[in-house]
Amino acid sequence: MAEQAGTEFDLVILGGGSGGYACALRAAQLGLSVALIEKGKLGGTCLHNGCIPTKALLHAAEVADLAREGEQFGIKTSLHGIDMAGVNAYKDGVISKLYKGLQGLVKSRKITLIEAEGRLSSATSVDAGGVRYTGKHIVLATGSVPRSLPGLEIDGTRVLTSDHALLLDRVPSSAIILGGGVIGVEFASVWKSFGADVTIVEALPHLVPIEDEANSKLLERAFRKRKIAFELGARFTGVSHTANGVQITTENGKTVEAEVLLVAIGRGPVSANLGYEEVGVEMERGFVKVDGLCQTNVPTISAVGDLIPTLQLAHVGFAEGILVAERLAGLDVVPIDYDGVPRVTYSEPEVASVGITEAVAKERLGADNVETITYDLAGNGKSQILKTAGAIKLVRQKDGPVLGVHIVGSRAGELVSEAQLIYNWEALPSEVAQLIHAHPTQGEALGEAHLALAGKPLHAHG
């Protein structure tokens, strides 16, 4: 492997997705020389195959719903159809603009971008494009890909991953979605808004199973109202092709037929055959093991993003990349409190949360030391204007701070930023209750929930 002039850096980063490029940008800002190696497009899954394109589809779906349902607001509108070529052009335009901006940002920070497939070759080097790049430190950020199940063959035509679904040039007449987590629920919401018949098949007892059970039940109620079907506690056993699509079977003997099957059972780390084990990096189930500061067992190697067994969220990747860059630059850093990371499912309605669930709180503190309250959005003026149903559930330590905020409703994702401050600043309900929220806003519902929890409800029965 050739070593050339200009191939020695303070930091070599393998992977240019959210975690990798955030690390590169912050490290360069702190004066480190940085090489960023990416075999695909800068921005990775989030920008090209994940967060951004799916949320663009979800916004288009919202527009479709508004067009279809305008008369409930006294506006005479109708939906004449979905032009998927136009929807995809809108989606791709958003991606393109952000991609060009990111490329310019990386260039402006004087980061050396290497567009080639890379492989870890030692504790201080990565080989890419026939060249060996050496660094005082290496950051692994190779991300994740959609998972499948043994014997479940993805063909990209009838059996799809989210990558295929984002590129469809039509709206399927019907779809089975295997998996009721974030990805499955979001695609179910999009396709239903676009006019497809949708059935979610989930092996666990609830949709979005990592959320507080109250949030899951509210989403399930909303999906029933939207006529999105779902089978819960239904373990997939097989799929076969039919004349018009696919048929799946479940362990409890049920069959479901549709035009396409979307496999949305989560994402697995990209780590195979990249030299990690050979260099001695400790692994577990394909993930790279790290400590609280994203340091592997090899002193010169760190890892961030979907490659490590933390929350698979772009903003977590950003935070981990920044943490590593600052640690390597000699700044004081502290571990990320993953409970304090906001989580949003951008379906209609949205599901947003921060902190811990009621079940986890009771497990950690004991049932007698946990209090909860639920504020129904029926009492919130702006939510009624938007015609959204849902609720805000607060979990607190008895006589102590708020431990969890769990929200279901349209635009819930926009409320979780304030909820994040409440949790991370260990606020008491009485302290939040003193804050005056603008009226009429949905943010006001957060204030009213805390008023109720502080024992002085306003637009709620107490």
Image (spheres, grey):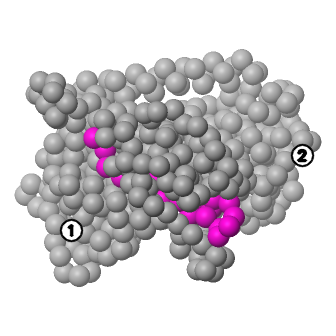
Name the spot of residue 390 as percent of width and height, x first: 36, 52
Q: Is residue 314 left or right of residue 56?
A: right
Identified at 15% across, 52% down, the residue is: 197
Q: Secondary structure beneath disc 2?
A: loop
Q: Residue furthest left?
A: 243
Contact check, label 2 and label 1, Cβ < 8 Å: no
- Residue occupied by mark 1: 248
Say whether disc 2 or disc 1 marks the residue closer to the N-terminus.
Answer: 1
- Residue occupied by mark 2: 332
Identified at 16% across, 24% down, the residue is: 75
Front position in the image: 441 or 230: 441
Q: Is residue 112 visible?
A: yes
Boundaries of the magenta span: 387-404
Q: Is residue 460 left or right of residue 140?
A: left
Name the spot of residue 289 as percent of width and height, x first: 71, 64
As shown in the figure, which amino acid type bears the numbered disc 1? Ile
**Image height check: is 422 above or below 355?**
above
